[in-house]
Amino acid sequence: MALDGERVCFNSPAGFCSDCGSILPLLGDRGAVKCYACGRSWGPEVFGDMAMTYTITMTALDAYEDTKVKEEEEKEEEAEGPVVDRKCPQCGNDKMSYATLQLRSADEGQTVFYTCTKCKFKETENS
């Protein structure tokens, strides 16, 4: 693909740099291609008669409606830890998840953090 006295090191197929043999990036919006490996610039003729096609598929807005409903249901049931039978003081739900941390001195009990699995209300209890 040499043009008017240009030096060619490789006999390369379309889409490859004939100076270093590297694959060339796709044609830019300015009609030129620059090899990533050796830095040489090429015109669109380096791709020969290659053609590229692509398809864009548009999806209806309501196609993901079922997914949104399922995600919201999973968020309601998603717990932040082990679940215990404990009534939520805010919504009355019978299930709360919990986590424990030792926030006070070692000779005192742990702090238990409860989270409602339905409304996400949080409360603490020092045991």
Image (cartoon, rainbow, N blue to C red):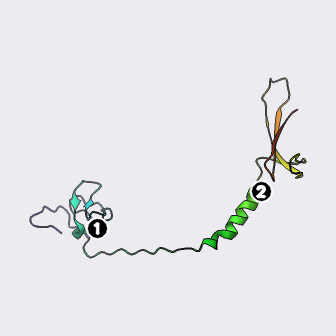
Q: Amino acid at mark 2?
A: Glu
Disc 2, SS? helix
How crowded pointer 1 is (Cα within 10 Å; few <14, some 14-19, many 20+) is rated as many
Q: Is residue 58 above or below residue 73?
A: below
In this rendering, position of residue 34 left or right of residue 121: left
Residue 72 spot, x, y in % from top left: 73, 60
Quadrant hosting residue 76 = bottom right
Q: CA distance from mark 1 to mark 2?
A: 53 Å
Compare marks 1 and 2 and give the one earlier in the sequence: 1
Q: Which mark is residue 15?
A: 1
Q: Is residue 51 above or below residue 102?
A: below
Please name the residue shown 51% across and 74% down the image: 57
Please name the residue shown 20% across and 67% down the image: 11
Disc 1, SS? loop
Looking at the image, which residue sits at the far left? 5
Please name the residue shown 17% across and 61% down the image: 9
Q: Nearer the viewer, residue 125 or 36?
A: 125
In this figure, which residue is indicated by the disc labeled 2? Answer: 76
Residue 73 spot, x, y in % from top left: 76, 61
In this rendering, position of residue 56 left or right of residue 28: right
Residue 30 spot, x, y in % from top left: 27, 63
Please name the residue shown 78% across and 48% down the image: 120
